[in-house]
Image (cartoon, helix red, strand yellow):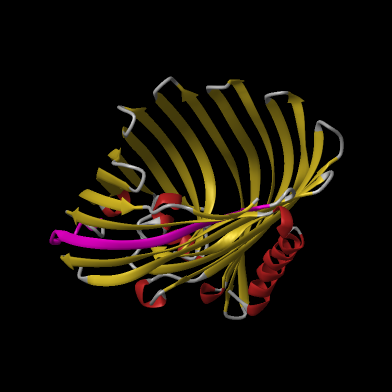
């Protein structure tokens, strides 16, 4: 992330904190620390089809959640880390970092929001779950900043404007075939409350994707229509869809290569809450940046079922399937094979008391690349114990 970009995010957050400082007489601040210890077993950590050994690992994860609010301002965030060591087939030690921040300031007719922060994780965590693509195993630093402004035109209609920034860098990226990238995006449109529990919106969207190490620049323009409807307090549906007109330009010496394509994206989310059970189903087609140095079209279907067994014991199962293919047809995009990734994770969560909790889960993953005759599977078992002392709070 450049100094200008850090300054941009700092100005937004500093302004919000300055507003909070002027309203400290009506402010409430809280902090909730925690620490977790976790053990892992994984039969194929890297999801490779090559001969490999089993891997064992342990995690130590301290963290701190914090919130603050005044009559018009809300701030929330987290500072956390994972100190991870793996043994066996994959011997390595690394540190994950998480610094998300969100803020909202409400005026008489306006709402200013900011979401962003830093995530340092590995490519088989956040990026795999976003794109469905298995990359070389290495650490990724991802900076994000998403300020937005909503202005209420009437009681039902509102103007919405937003900006989205991301910057990803990979440790030893070029040696592993990964390239750094950044994206700049903007959206503007209107939303309308057509009923108490129904809202529609129309948005124009523009995105710029850059991968300087491979001289690739991609411009995306499009639109999106969405509908949110709550049939009842326990049943809701969200639908989104729209076209994306994509232009790829790659500099090759003194020449520039370019192409154009159209991709339709969509998202559907259905949630149903029963007395002790909740079900969430979602299906989507999206365009995501990737460390391969191009945009990835990801088709995803997922379902999550959660059930409260007792007052302190709950169970859940999550399953999802990804189909990923490259959007670009130039350079590296032409060499990107379509691949599938499927995962399933049953999980038990036990709240022992107000301070202690435990979790145990099994994870299954399967990767397929038909054109390369690649099939790889992994099975993993994890157990974690978390200690959460009393929350600290001041004000009001």
Who is closer to the viewer here, 267 or 139?
139
Considering depth in this image, is 305 or 140 the residue closer to the camera? Answer: 305
Instruction: Count numbered badges in the picture.
Output: 0
Q: Is residue 195 left or right of residue 122?
A: right
> Does the magenta-highlighted stretch encompass residue 52?
yes
Residue 125 part of the magenta segment: no
Q: Classify residue 372 as left or right of residue 1.
A: left
The residue drawn where x is 54% and y is 68% is: 181
Residue 163 appears in the rendering: no
Q: Where, by quadrant of the figure, is residue 315 drawn? A: top left
Image quarter where the N terminus lies is bottom right
Give coordinates of residue 224: x percent, y percent: 68, 40
Instruction: Where is residue 131? Give x, y as percent.
Output: 44, 51
| Percent x, y of residue 233 | 57, 22
Position of residue 19 in the picture relative to residue 389 (left or right): right
Rendered view: 88 above or below 388:
below
Residue 167 seen anywhere in this rendered image of the structure: yes
Q: Main secondary structure of the magenta part?
A: strand
Residue in the picture at 61% in, 24% down: 230
Residue 337 spot, x, y in % from top left: 38, 54
User: Magenta segment range?
Assistant: 47-69
Residue 370 in the image: above or below residue 282: below
Q: In this orientation, which residue lies closer to the viewer: 366 or 25?
A: 25
């Amino acid at each position: 992330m450049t100094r200008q970009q850090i300054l941009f995010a700092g100005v937004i957050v500093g302004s919000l904190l300055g507003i909070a400082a002027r309203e400290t007489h009506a402010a409430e601040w809280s902090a909730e620390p925690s620490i977790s210890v976790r053990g892992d077993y994984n039969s194929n950590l890297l999801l490779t089809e090559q001969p490999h050994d089993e891997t064992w690992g342990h995690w130590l994860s301290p963290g701190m959640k914090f919130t603050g609010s005044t009559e018009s301002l809300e701030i929330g965030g987290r500072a956390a880390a994972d100190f991870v060591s793996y043994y066996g087939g994959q011997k390595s030690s690394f540190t994950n970092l998480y610094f998300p921040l969100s803020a909202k300031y409400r005026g008489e007719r306006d709402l200013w929001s900011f979401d962003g922060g830093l995530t340092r994780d590995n490519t088989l965590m956040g990026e795999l779950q976003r794109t469905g693509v298995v990359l070389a195993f290495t650490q990724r630093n991802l900076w994000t900043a998403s300020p937005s402004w909503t202005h209420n035109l009437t009681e039902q209609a509102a103007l919405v404007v937003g900006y989205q920034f991301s910057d990803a860098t990979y440790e030893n990226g070029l040696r592993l075939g990964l390239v750094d990238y950044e994206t700049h995006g903007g959206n503007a449109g209107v939303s309308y409350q057509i009923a108490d529990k129904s809202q529609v919106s129309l948005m124009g969207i523009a995105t710029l994707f850059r991968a300087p190490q491979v001289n690739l620049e991609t411009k995306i323009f499009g639109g999106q229509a969405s509908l949110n409807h709550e049939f009842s307090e326990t049943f809701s549906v969200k639908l989104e869809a729209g076209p994306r007109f994509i232009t790829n330009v790659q500099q090759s010496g003194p020449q520039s290569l370019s192409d154009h394509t159209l991709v339709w994206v969509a998202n559907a989310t259905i949630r149903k809450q029963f007395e002790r059970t909740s079900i969430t189903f979602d299906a989507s087609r999206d365009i995501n940046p990737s460390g391969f140095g191009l945009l990835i079209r990801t088709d995803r279907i997922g379902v999550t079922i959660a059930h409260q067994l007792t007052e302190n014991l709950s169970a859940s199962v999550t399953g999802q399937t990804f189909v990923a293919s490259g959007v670009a047809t130039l350079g590296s995009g032409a060499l990107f094979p379509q691949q599938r990734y499927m995962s399933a994770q049953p999980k038990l969560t036990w709240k022992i008391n107000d301070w202690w909790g435990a979790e145990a889960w099994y994870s299954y993953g399967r990767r397929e690349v038909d054109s390369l005759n690649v099939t790889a599977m992994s099975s993993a078992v994890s157990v974690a114990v978390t200690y959460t002392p009393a929350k600290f709070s001041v004000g009001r």
